[in-house]
Image (cartoon, rainbow, N blue to C red):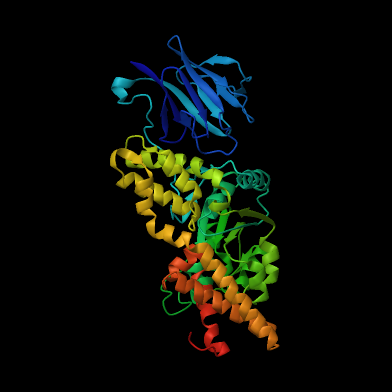
């Protein structure tokens, strides 16, 4: 039996078409869900099998549906919305900027059937791959219908083509800052070059310069050979500086020089190198407060904030939760090669109202764990309650803990003002109290403090050290 397939060009991704209507778009309600371009409409087009032939119709998409007939040298022609066009084996179709080839295959020989996706190049959320070459290997789809997500998508469309402008992405841990950075790169003129990620919180001050700028052989004791730094690796492409608020001050000064003229020297080297790199930075810290604390350079702040995009926490955009859940179910299903999973209404209501301290990342891992652990792939309230039991206790107590913390801080401020204490000392005592209370709240787990409160390990330890500096007693 013959069936139709949409084969993504230069990819292994295949979408097997069914008899009847196949709605194509980025909405989770579509039969063929296509990621890879934020210009693809929610319900972009329809391919329908009529009298044994597959016919293509644009569904009033914003950026159009395009077709190029097999064997012609002509460029793509845009289809008029509402008009039906018969597809022939070998025709090429373009939705937004993504190209597919339409094929007629014998399903019995190919081993495929409708309602299946054979393979996918999707990069799953939470992948910690350091370097991504070209736009083909990254997710270029942002899931959500909230006003904040729409604003982020609008910003991406405006900012991505202006690849000489640095971008600062702000938001709590797990909101998708890294994903948005990849989208910006994939939609930019630099998308064929490397996207290189450096986690600034994960490098020591001693090695920060070597990581960014590289080093020459013999530059220091363990420098047994020359090393190429992140700037050279990203030359022509994009360098994503994650958690830039934790970058050492000494390295900040050198980074500023590179941003100004594109020049630097490797550690231990004398030759000045020149690179062309776009900087995208991200942070979950209040950089303005860090400037006041003298832990972040003000001139660097103004250099990297050429354009800013803020990602709100998931608890502030609950209407995006069902879309994200269905999207994650779909891609995890492909990854696990499992049957379709169903999320019950009670479970979905629970997920919408959960606090999600770990934001979208936590939601993804919750859905993934549920699909692995659930019986008969029914994702119900019981399985999510079991998986999120500890986090639920944390979130249910979160409001009272915040209120208690605020009360303590207000009492401390009142007490110190009455003593006419130095404002800087007041500020440091407040920082110490918050850090200590956050650590106690998370049972002494510093990683949990970063996940729940968005406070990096470096900042936490720094504020805890205020205790000895201020001469505070143990409480």
Q: Position of residue 287 (x, y in %)?
A: 64, 67
Q: Is residue 384 left or right of residue 275?
A: left
Q: Is residue 361 visible?
A: yes
Q: Is residue 215 visible?
A: no
Q: Nearer the viewer, residue 336 or 315?
A: 315
- Residue 330 lies, with reference to residue 304, above or below; the image says above
What percent of the width, then of the height, locates residue 225? 42, 70
Q: In the picture shown, does residue 19 fall above or below 245?
A: above
Quadrant holding the N terminus: top left
Residue 162 position within the rendered picture, expressed as x and y whole percent measured from the top left = 68, 48
Q: Residue at x 41, y 41 (%)?
A: 329
Query: As displayed, is residue 255 above or below residue 465?
Result: above
In this view, the residue in front, 453 or 188, is: 453
Q: Quadrant of residue 119?
A: top left
Answer with left or right where residue 147 lies relative to residue 388.
right
266 lies left or right of 394:
right
Picture coordinates of residue 285 (x, y %)?
59, 66
The residue closer to the viewer here, 449 or 78, is 449
Image mark count: 0
**Residue placed at 41% from the left, 38% from the top?**
330
> What residue is at 66 percent from the left and 47 percent from the top?
155
Q: Is residue 114 above or below residue 377?
A: above
**Residue furthest bottom in the image:** 471
């Amino acid at each position: 039996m013959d069936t139709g397939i949409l084969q993504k060009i230069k990819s292994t991704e295949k979408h097997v078409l069914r008899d009847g209507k196949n709605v194509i778009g980025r909405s989770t309600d579509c039969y063929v869900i296509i990621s890879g371009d934020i210009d693809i409409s929610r319900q972009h087009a329809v391919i329908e099998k009529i009298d044994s032939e597959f016919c293509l119709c644009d569904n009033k998409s914003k950026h159009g549906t395009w077709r190029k007939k097999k064997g012609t040298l002509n460029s793509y022609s845009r289809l008029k919305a509402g008009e039906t066009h018969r597809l022939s084996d070998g025709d090429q179709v373009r939705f937004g900027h993504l190209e597919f080839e339409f094929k007629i295959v014998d399903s019995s020989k190919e081993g495929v059937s409708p309602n299946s996706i054979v393979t996918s190049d999707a990069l799953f959320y939470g992948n910690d791959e350091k370097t991504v070459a070209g736009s083909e290997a990254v997710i270029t789809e942002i899931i959500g219908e909230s006003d904040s997500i729409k604003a982020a998508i609008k910003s991406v469309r405006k900012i991505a083509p202006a690849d000489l402008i640095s971008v600062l992405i702000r938001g709590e841990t797990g909101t998708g800052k890294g994903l948005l950075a990849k989208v910006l790169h994939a939609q930019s003129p630099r998308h064929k070059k490397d996207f290189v990620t450096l986690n600034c919180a994960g490098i020591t001050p001693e090695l920060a310069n070597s990581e960014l700028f590289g080093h020459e052989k013999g530059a220091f004791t363990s420098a047994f050979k020359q090393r190429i730094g992140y700037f050279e690796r990203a030359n022509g492409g994009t360098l994503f500086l994650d958690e830039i608020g934790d970058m050492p001050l000494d390295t900040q000064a050198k980074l500023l020089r590179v941003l100004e003229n594109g020049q630097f020297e490797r550690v231990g080297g004398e030759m000045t190198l020149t690179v062309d790199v776009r900087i995208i930075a991200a942070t979950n810290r209040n950089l303005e407060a860090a400037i006041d604390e003298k832990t972040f350079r003000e001139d660097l702040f103004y250099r990297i904030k050429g354009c800013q995009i803020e990602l709100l926490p998931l608890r502030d955009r609950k209407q995006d939760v069902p879309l994200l859940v269905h999207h994650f179910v779909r891609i995890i299903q492909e990854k696990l090669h499992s049957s379709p999973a169903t999320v019950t209404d009670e479970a979905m209501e629970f997920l919408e109202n959960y606090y999600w301290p770990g934001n979208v990342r936590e939601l993804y891992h919750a859905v993934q764990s549920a699909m692995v652990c659930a019986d008969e792939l029914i994702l119900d309230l019981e399985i999510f309650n079991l998986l999120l039991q500890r986090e639920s206790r944390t979130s249910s107590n979160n409001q009272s803990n915040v209120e208690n913390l605020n009360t303590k801080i207000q009492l401390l401020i009142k007490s110190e003002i009455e003593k006419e204490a130095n404002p800087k000392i007041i500020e440091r005592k407040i920082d110490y109290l918050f850090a200590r209370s956050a650590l106690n709240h998370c049972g002494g787990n510093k990683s949990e403090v970063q996940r729940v409160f968005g406070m990096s390990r470096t900042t936490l330890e720094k504020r805890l050290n205020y205790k000895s500096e201020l001469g505070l007693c143990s409480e």
